[in-house]
Image (cartoon, coloured by chain):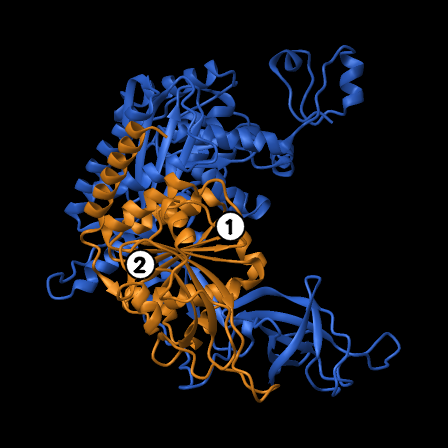
Amino acid sequence: MSGARISALATLRSQIERIETAEVVHQHDRVALGHSEADTALKGGLARAAIHEVFCEGRQGAAATGFVMGLAGRVSARRPLLWVRQDFSEIETGALSMSGLSELGLDPRRVVMVRAADVESALRTSADALACDALGAVVLELWGETRQFDLVASRKLTLAAQSSGVTGLMLRMAAQPLPSTAETRWMLRAAHSPPGSAWSAWGAPRFDAELLRNRHGPCGRWIMEWNCDECQFSEPSTYPQPVAAAPAHRQDSAVFRQRRAG
Amino acid sequence: MIHALDEAAERLGLYIGQPLANARAMCPDLKVFDADVAADAKTLSDIADWCDRFTPLVALDVPHGLFLDITGCAHLFGGEAALLRTLVRALDRQGFAVSAAIAGTSVCARTLTRQATGTIVADGGEAAAIDQFPVSALGAGEAITTGLRRAGLKTIGDVASRSSHEITARFGARFSTLLAHALGQGDAPINPRKPLPDYIVEKRFAEPIATDTMIAMTLSRLADTLIASMEKQGKGARRLEAAFFRTDGVVRAITVETGRPVTRSAVIDRLFRERLDALADPLDPGFGFDMVRLSASRTEIVVQEQRDLDAHVHDNDEIAALIDRIAARIGGKRVVVHLPQDTHIPERAVWSAPAQHHLAAAMQAEWPVRTESEPPLRPLRLFDKPEPIKVPFATVPDGPPHQFTWRRALHAVVRVEGPERIAMEWWQQDGKQLTRDYFRIEDAEGLRFWIFRDGLYEGETFDGEGKPVSPNWYVHGLFA
């Protein structure tokens, strides 16, 4: 690569940086999740007025739903929540149950559900809803890979979220991460209950949450437990099992740079 | 059997109800088509749609007639005669054979159409106008018409000259009422196809409009007018209908509903824009629309709420408006809120109600309180229909399985809690429903399931010969 080219690239990069930082200057509104390591990595908590993506494999759909519901409960601060889902995901992982929701300590009264027939109408509805500042959060649940949810669509949602201050949460089941304008991207798996007293113990929901991308901080992987009474995440109470996790304090720089560029 | 015939056939002496073989004998090269009653009814209803441009009160008189209540409408078209002329000419041009008449009562007008099309009878002149017509013109049915003729009463005037108790005694009260209505003594109300909207505004065009921008502009102007007239009475619209009258007679009506009374024309404008954008079969202007009508078919009195003290009121307004917009685009049944139901059966514990109508109720619903410091007892995702799983064996007959196959994947059970027994509501159901034993299960991967055994072990499930068989297992939900 010639010198001129590199300098041109550098100029462009700095321009983009300027544009992006200009946009996110007002984005200091963060909500602590309750899990201290995750909160440190997120610089204090999950940013409001941004888009966050949660990916999972198809069979982990329920766990990811629980995690997204937890995030939505944290950021929405007693404001209504609009949950947009595609018809197909209800067949695959079942309908969101309000009894289950209230068992997690969240309030089913604040949930308005939109049953979109296809991805286009789901995307359009979410973009419309994200512009409505009376909402606390908008969740868009999509099943499988979709062509429609591309960089342009993602950018539209981000802009809508930034202008209104509403947080957008994308629940992408059975999908692979693609380049997007999301603030954070998570990969979710269900975590085991703490060992011991087999055939009996059954604790609070546990998530094996991997932060794949974080625009303003390091990534990491943690076991997070949802505390149904206090409505926040916490460190696993007793967790002697080893976790194959990337240490939060020492990020994998190669991976990190690649993600940033994407 | 001949169902209907055209003028040429009538001139040959054929008549309705004649057997087809007889008709063929009289006229060997008769062209015959099968009668399609459904298509006839559809055409009549399409014509009725078209007639909506003259008056909102249009009633069907099956199989071949329409009643239009033009009270107070005629002057808009230059008087009764001009209205009649316009209507007949327009229908004629579309290829329909039409006979029409105007009279003070619907029965009288119908009698006139059968004998003297194009007549306009002034109030009080009904009896004089029809007394020369044969009794068959009343349309009282075959038996009564024949009976009258046998009694020597050939014209309506003959029948009218008899005293009414004689007629009632011989032909029944219904016929004497019909006769009285035909003679202008009392009137039966017509039964309009659509209820009269509370407010109507419309715009006619000398030059038909076809472009989207013109349509949008027209709608927003109409919305302004509609809102202005509703505002005077303190009303807001809950359901709005826009009807587009095409020059070739096709009418397309589009309805939007709102959760709260709408009092701003910008909102109406936006709702219709969303709805028009999302139509599966878009508005086809053809050669253009020559009339657009906006009507508020359901209205409510607007309650002005205190806004300054309670910020939530404003928020709720905004959410209601958002729900209206989404509902206008994808349908009202697709935006739901949830109301708890008083039952133990998991799949019926929640009712998903349309958000437009139940938002306020849902915001105040009383949900069962969860037990503190307990893990979740109900799954976060529930299958609409429990999915069958294969369970090879259970250690204890009544106990949970060791492993199970769901969606072709084998899950080894690591942790179990249960059973939680849920009995069915025998007082609600006719057929026998089985008691379910629910288990909360965690597999080796950490996935959590809510599975149940449908029926007590060796107690409720039997094969054809009455021997107990092992019950089926299902997965009903997934925990987070």
At a point 52% along the width and 34% down the height, the residue shown is B159
Instruction: Write down the colour of chain B.
Output: blue
Q: Which chain letter matches label 1?
A: A
Which chain is indicated by disc 2? A
Describe residue A224's horizontal placement relative to residue A194 as left or right: left
Q: In the image, is A101 to the left or to the right of B12?
A: left
Residue A5 quadrant: top left
Q: Which residue lies at the image location 42% right of the left edge and 43% below the top edge?
A: B188
Local SS, label 1: loop
Residue B97: % across, % down:
52, 18
- Picture coordinates of residue B335 (x, y %)? 41, 54
In the rendered image, is residue B9 in sight? yes
**Marks 2 and 1 share the same chain:** yes
Q: Nearer the viewer, residue B359 or A193?
A: A193
For chain A, give the colour: orange
Residue with the mark numbered 1: A176
Q: Amino acid at mark 2?
A: Gly
